Amino acid sequence: MSDNKTQNGGTAEKGPGQLPELVKFRNVTKVFGSGPNARTAIQDVTFTVHDEPGSGELIAIVGPSGCGKSTVLRIIAGLEPHFPPTAGEVFVCGKPICKPGADRGVVDQKYSLLPHLTVLENIAFGLKLRGVSRRERLDRAREWAKKVGLEGAERSYPHELSGGMQQRVAIAATLILEPRILLMDEPFGALDPKIRMQMQALLIDLWREQQSTVFIVTHAVEEAVYLGDRVFRMAAKPGRLVEVLSVPRPDVPPEVMRKQPWFMEMTQDLLHRLEADAPATGALNGVKG
């Protein structure tokens, strides 16, 4: 995994020429509106995430409200109105992005479940759209319900589930489609701290099994350090990438990792840098997972 180094500035390169490029931003700027009403969401953002055989990288993006974190995610996803960028180039698997694709899956805070479908039907819905037979898609959905801890709830409807359970459904419904890149926008932001930590541990387990590359946007500094192989720190007005932290990933339980001195020091240092970037926003969740 990664060693503990810091890169400063507007680029995030892991080592040119080492591995194929999975996601690449080259001087990407996004402006909404025009004339006096124009607002620059991100400016000159450049980074590369390589395609690592047998494993994916987990990128945590952190920063104050309005710094363009979600804009970066939605540009990768190819979702309007954030896509296309106003300037710059974006590549996935070496090809320019032109629209959403099956190689990218999105999970956000709103869960995006269909209220009239059961847990099992929600998980299987994407396979249905791809023409997979009913028997196969439901069998695979049952496997995913088990993976995310929803055994016994397969026939429940979204309104009967807690927020944490709904998010498990949303994650399963996305990962069952085997996206190469998983894009997560504040997926655990509405959960209480205990459930949030459980979901973080679940994400790590699924990430290791699926070997997808994951981008996760969060306001929670501890969450960013716990989850990320690298942490992209963004600043606002305009949104820009100002620092990249490489985070070690020791093979220890999460409750042990969070108590290690290096983890607490890195978390506090990152929090102080973010507070210095946006002292008046109050938009950061400190070290509360």
Image (cartoon, rainbow, N blue to C red):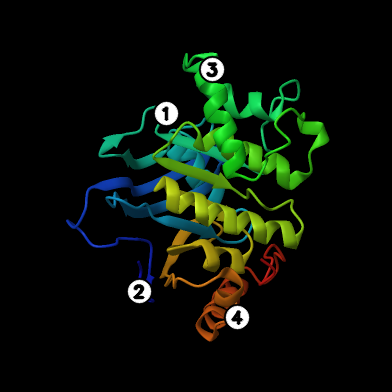
Please, what is the three-letter code of the amino acid marked with disc 3?
A: Arg
- Tell me the CA gap for discs 1 and 3: 22 Å
Contact check, label 4 and label 3, Cβ < 8 Å: no
- Of the image marks 1 and 4, the number of the one nearer the N terminus: 1
The reply to whether residue 232 is visible in this rendering is yes
Towards the viewer: 215 or 36: 215
Q: Where is residue 145 in the image (x, y as percent from the top left)?
A: 61, 37
The reply to whether residue 34 is visible in this rendering is no
- Tell me the CA gap for discs 1 and 4: 39 Å
Please, what is the three-letter code of the amino acid marked with disc 1?
A: Ala
Q: Which mark is residue 102?
A: 1
Density class for disc 2 (Cα within 10 Å; few <14, some 14-19, many ≥20) is few
Depth-wise, is mark 4 or mark 3 nearer the camera?
3
Depth-wise, is mark 2 or mark 4 nearer the camera?
4
Q: In which quarter of the image is the C terminus?
A: bottom right
Q: Where is residue 212 in the image (x, y as percent from the top left)?
A: 41, 46
- Tell me the CA gap for discs 2 and 4: 19 Å
What kind of element bears circle 4? loop
Q: Name the residue that disc number 3 marks.
A: 135
Q: Residue 3 carries which label?
A: 2
Residue located 79% across and 38% down the image: 161
Report the residue that reaches farthest toward the left. Answer: 17
Q: Residue 259 carries which label?
A: 4
- Of the image marks 2 and 4, the number of the one nearer the N terminus: 2
Please, what is the three-letter code of the amino acid marked with disc 4?
A: Lys
